[in-house]
Image (cartoon, rainbow, N blue to C red):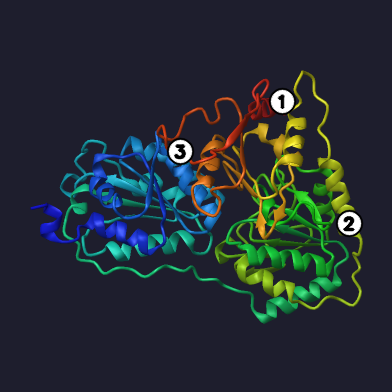
Amino acid sequence: MDCAAAIGRTVGQALVDQLVIQGVRHVFCVPGESYLPVLDALRDSGVTVTVCRHEGGAAMMADAVGRATGRPGVAMVTRGPGASNAMVGVHIAHEDSSPMILFVGQVDEGFRDRGAWQEMDLRSTFGGICKWVGELDHPGRVGEMTARAFSTAMSRRPGPVVLGLPRNVLAKADHSTDSRPVRPVEGGPDASALAQLQAMLAESRRPMVIAGGSRWDEASRAALHRFAERFALPVATSYRRGHLFDADHPNYAGDLGLGASPKLVARVKAADLVLLVGGRLGQVPAQGYTLLDIPAPQTRLVHIHADPDELGQLYQPTLAIPATPRRAMPALAALEVPQEIAWTGQAEVAHADYLAWSQVATPQPGDVNFGDVVVWLRDHLQRDAILCNGAGGYAAWAEALRRVRAARGKAQCDHAGQGDDGVGGAGVELSLEQRAPDPHRHRQQVAHRAPGGDSVVRLRPGQEPPGAARHVEQGQGAGGGVQVEIER
């Protein structure tokens, strides 16, 4: 008789059942003997399993699921070298506020703290870049631990979670209770904060909106557009967040990324009211922390963020509003417009400056001007295409010239190796994964990469999704971002 049948549901089977309950449709992994019971259970679960050549690619693909869906992407690796290889993807999810869960096969419980083969302390290894590191050390806690992993990954500022899976526990009989589907808490602005914000807008002469971060959806993006239109506000997007606002919209002022327009930077610095929604304004969007004074900004700052702990951590705002964009933006769009808008016309000027900055490529020596390639792609790709790249200095071409648009209720996706602070080498992984989950599977996509940035083929042969990404490879000249730093 089959051992699993003799003992009923195993812990490995129970774990997969929890993934199904939480709506997981895709798992990315490099198989390992340390979590074979889970792999066996996945076979008949209905969950699609993509086997990768490298754990870093698996983790990056799981991160991409989190970006595209707002639900944690799931990766599975073995301990030791497997977990170490996956760390770069975990770091990306941490920096980019993407919900993801990395399951790591562990040594048997009885072998712990003996220096067993490939044994590692997951808490000390991942603790600095994860929201929570746990271990499934009891067969009665599968539902509890899985639900906590999903809740933690999605709550407040989203991010990665690592959960260890001791090999001997996975084969034991399960004694746990199934979890319910986890839904993140959506905090909203209170009436007093909205009233204060409305008064600040009425007093302003040069307001500016910066949209960034995570926990947005189609409804909140649409509300952001309504808010900008009703109040005639210029809107900039943060680093790698171009998909939050249609680049063709007359209120769009550009993105604060690697290729930010000097006029946009000057406009933000001169604003008498900056409304930062969803983002943290890290190193890149803050242009090396020169955009706003730290800790006390030179202008009035209204900071809206899902995590109260982020408010005041770097910038001391005039008004701090702990709320997710999903709850905040509909409330802002419903505010009463001043009888007179003192800044009328500023959004149009900002948009004209953006169009002029991003219209044509700067002339370059040589037979191929990569800027011209980006402009051609911009003019010929479908409006809901998916755009992916790593985060090296080479990406400044794409950041400055491509325009992320909206079409038929869908925004073009603007994804990179990193959201706030930048890690290179993820463009191809992100683009491959964006093909996997519906409804993105049949959308055009382009992965923009530098030589060597995405040099490892991340999927097993034959597992590339239909119509997998076309990629554009750009030379970095004398070192790309490295050379930029040398020349400073």
Q: What residue lies at 63% left-to-right and 63% top-to-bottom? A: 218
Is residue 367 toward the left or the right of residue 2 in the image? right
Q: In the figure, residue 332 lies in which quadrant?
A: bottom right
Q: For mark 3, give the secondary structure.
A: helix
Estimate the x, y position of residue 409 in percent, counting from the top left.
67, 60
Specify the label residue 348 is tagged with: 2
Quadrant of the image for the C terminus?
Answer: top right
Closer to the camera in the image, 168 or 322: 168
Q: Which badge, 2 or 1, is on the more N-terminal residue?
A: 2
Q: Which residue is denoted by mark 3 in the rendering?
A: 57
Q: What residue lies at 33% left-to-right and 62% top-to-bottom? A: 18
The kind of residue tagged 1 is Glu
Specify the label residue 487 is tagged with: 1
Estimate the x, y position of residue 11 in percent, counting from the top left.
22, 57
The answer for how far apart the CA atoms under marks 2 and 3 are is 42 Å
For marks 2 and 1, give the one nearer the viewer.
Answer: 2
The answer for how far apart the CA atoms under marks 1 and 3 are is 32 Å
Q: What residue lies at 22% left-to-right and 36% top-to-bottom? A: 117
Q: Which badge, 2 or 3, is on the more N-terminal residue?
A: 3
Is residue 185 toward the left or the right of residue 330 in the image? left
